């Protein structure tokens, strides 16, 4: 029998307890706006819950949220939690087939969206017939006339906040699914990770313990709340610890230190190339004049780690995880830097090992294989992929979750991430499905077939660039610029290829399977078109 009492591991309940205990203490602040205290966030969440109930949202219903970083995002999440409904956050860069797949797969009928993203929903309205209600926010201060939809009902978010802050009477347990987050696939569309409330709570609790958060901390967050990193590892961690959260809309390497100093941040979190982008900024006399005591940074490169710590007078800690499995490893707080290691397994909660990717047999220390993970505590792990049972079974081979990541483990139990096994591309902190990018490329009238691969970035660490290899239809002509113009209307900005190469044919096996390894090995040649060298700009919409 489990020795952990998880009965209170439900987001709405955690907020209620902290509001009662901490009341007027500041909880969350967006940029330079007035902070919201714990009681005000609690009451706002009650108002949202009552309003959504009035729109017919019930226990188990999925609710789509496409909103930029803001206090409103958190009010929505907590309100959804109190109804026992399921948060489905959407990457705000999604559009076209990317967006439509998430909407259809989630089977949601209510969509909360900021006015900034209305055009992409309006363009896809005919492809998502199940949605019937749109709740419109204006966090981005876009203003303008009421939206026009052919059939959807539009409700202003401000009207939701006019509802009474009366607690709703819904029984929600830690076993209930609290969120579905979509993570890029490799041989198919993005998969919706079914995340129980206990799974969400452990994301936050793990960060609290690894970073030693206290009520006196100020956590600076510049990453998007539609990802688990910001929402659960950061915002939820602050709620659990009772400390203050400061949100900004986006990350800026040039303004990062100014924000850290302005808000008095003691803790922050960086992902992918963010840490290196900060390090690349010209040194300033005030670099060490800040209150930062610790940063969770993934990955940490030994080439600059020690100097980063000295320059900014802070501690760097690394970890490893993914939406499906939580964060099973952190570097122990007092360990100090250990080159290219993501720490030790949190053995109270998880088991983790390195196996042969073909046989699943465990490998000796310092041998590279696949990282596999499983939980020790029930409901602290994903419970499957939404409406994709075959993908769930595939991932859970031999009773271990197969991450698709290559890694190794030292004799004294320190794990290291080495590379990705699966055909997934990671760029600017985003996982990109080559399948979904290829689907857009192949829909162009001039393209006969395509293959998308990762090529090495000039940025150290685990950063990729996207290369598109395309074969044109007989008699067709197409420029790289025209192809990327087409892509920008149909995919997130971060997925738009940097490199384009037109080929007479793609390398294939005798069974007509594209040999992507040959295209990866080919890399970037002298004649490969590079949008950055060509001065082509991708719009971040």
Image (cartoon, helix red, strand yellow):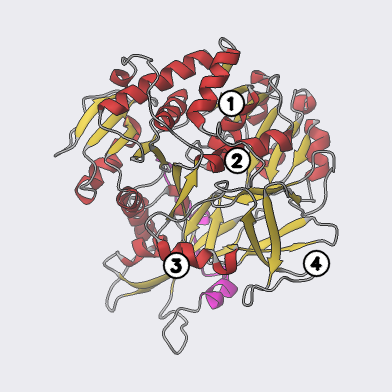
At horizontal 44% and vertical 67% (from top left) the residue drawn is 187
Q: Do the residues labelled 1 and 3 touch (CB within 8 Å)?
A: no
Residue 482 in the image: x percent, y percent?
Answer: 34, 58
Mark 3 = which residue? Answer: 187
Above or below — where is 140 with respect to 517? above
Q: Residue 538: within the magenta?
A: yes
Above or below — where is 63 with respect to 246? below
Circle nearer the N terminus (2, 1): 2
Circle nearer the N terminus (1, 3): 3
Q: In which quarter of the image is residue 142?
A: top left
Q: Nearer the viewer, mark 1 or mark 4?
A: 1
Q: Can residue 29 be seen in this view?
A: no
Q: How far apart are marks 1 and 3 (CA)?
A: 37 Å
Residue 269 in the image: x percent, y percent?
Answer: 65, 36
Residue 301 in the image: x percent, y percent?
Answer: 75, 50
Q: How far apart are marks 2 and 1 (CA)?
A: 12 Å
Q: Are marks 1 and 4 in contact (CB under 8 Å)?
A: no
Dot 1, how many residues are within 10 Å of its Cα: few (below 14), some (14-19), or many (20+)? many
Q: Residue 284: within the magenta?
A: no
Q: Distance between the residues labelled 3 and 2?
A: 27 Å
Q: In which quarter of the image is residue 421?
A: bottom right
Circle nearer the N terminus (4, 3): 3
Query: Along the line of sight, which residue is nearer the eye, 21 or 235?
Result: 21
Query: Along the line of sight, which residue is nearer the eye, 360 or 434?
Result: 360
Mark 1 = which residue? Answer: 239
Q: How far apart are marks 4 and 3 (CA)?
A: 30 Å
Mark 2 = which residue? Answer: 203
* In the image: residue 265, left or right of residue 531: right
Dot 4, how many residues are within 10 Å of its Cα: few (below 14), some (14-19), or many (20+)? some
């Amino acid at each position: 029998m489990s020795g952990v009492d998880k009965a209170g591991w439900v987001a709405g309940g955690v907020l209620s307890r902290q509001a009662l205990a901490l009341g007027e203490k500041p909880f969350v602040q967006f940029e330079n706006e007035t902070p919201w205290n714990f009681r005000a966030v609690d009451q706002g969440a009650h108002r949202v819950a009552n309003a959504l109930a009035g729109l017919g949202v019930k226990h188990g219903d999925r609710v789509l949220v496409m909103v930029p970083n803001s206090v409103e995002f958190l009010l929505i999440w907590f309100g959804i939690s109190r109804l026992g409904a399921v948060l489905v956050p959407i990457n705000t860069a999604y559009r076209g087939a990317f967006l439509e797949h998430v909407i259809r797969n989630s089977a949601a009928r209510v969509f909360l969206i900021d006015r900034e993203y209305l055009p992409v929903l309006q363009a896809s309205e005919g492809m998502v017939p199940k949605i019937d209600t749109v709740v419109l926010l204006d966090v981005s201060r876009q203003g303008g006339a009421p939206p026009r939809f052919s059939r959807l009902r539009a409700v202003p978010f401000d009207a939701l906040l006019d509802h009474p802050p009366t607690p709703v009477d819904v029984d929600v347990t830690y076993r209930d699914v609290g969120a579905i987050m979509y993570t890029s696939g490799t041989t198919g569309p993005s998969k919706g990770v079914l995340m129980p409330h206990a799974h969400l709570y452990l994301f936050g609790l793990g960060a609290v313990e690894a970073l030693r958060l206290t009520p006196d901390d100020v956590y600076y967050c510049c990453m998007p709340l539609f990802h688990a990193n910001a929402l659960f590892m950061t915002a939820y961690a602050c709620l659990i610890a009772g400390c203050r959260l400061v949100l900004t809309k986006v990350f800026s390497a040039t303004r990062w230190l100014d924000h850290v100093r302005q808000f008095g941040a003691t803790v922050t979190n960086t992902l992918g190339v963010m840490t290196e982008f900060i390090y690349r900024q010209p040194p300033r006399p005030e670099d060490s004049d800040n209150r930062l005591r610790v940063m969770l940074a993934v990955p940490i490169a030994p080439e600059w780690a020690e100097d980063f710590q000295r320059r900014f007078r802070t501690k760097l800690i690394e970890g490893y995880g993914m939406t499906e499995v939580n964060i099973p490893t952190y570097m122990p707080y007092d360990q100090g830097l250990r080159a290219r290691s993501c720490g030790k397994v949190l053995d109270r909660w998880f088991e983790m090992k390195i196996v042969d990717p073909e046989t699943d047999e465990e490998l000796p220390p310092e041998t590279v294989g696949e990282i596999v993970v499983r939980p020790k505590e029930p409901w602290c792990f994903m419970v499957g992929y939404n409406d994709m049972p075959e993908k769930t079974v595939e991932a859970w081979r031999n009773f271990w979750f197969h991450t698709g990541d290559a890694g190794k483990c030292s004799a004294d139990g320190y794990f290291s991430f080495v590379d990705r096994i699966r055909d997934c591309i990671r760029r600017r902190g985003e996982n990109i499905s080559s399948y979904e990018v290829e689907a857009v490329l192949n829909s162009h009238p001039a393209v006969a077939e395509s293959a998308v691969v990762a090529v090495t970035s000039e940025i150290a660490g685990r950063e990729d660039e996207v290369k598109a290899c395309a074969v044109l239809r007989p008699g067709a002509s197409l420029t790289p610029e025209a192809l990327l113009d087409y892509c920008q209307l149909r995919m997130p900005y971060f997925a738009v290829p940097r490199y384009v190469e037109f080929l007479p044919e793609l390398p294939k096996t005798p069974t007509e399977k594209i040999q992507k390894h040959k295209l990866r090995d080919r890399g970037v040649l002298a004649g490969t078109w590079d949008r950055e060298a060509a001065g082509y700009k991708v719009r971040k919409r």
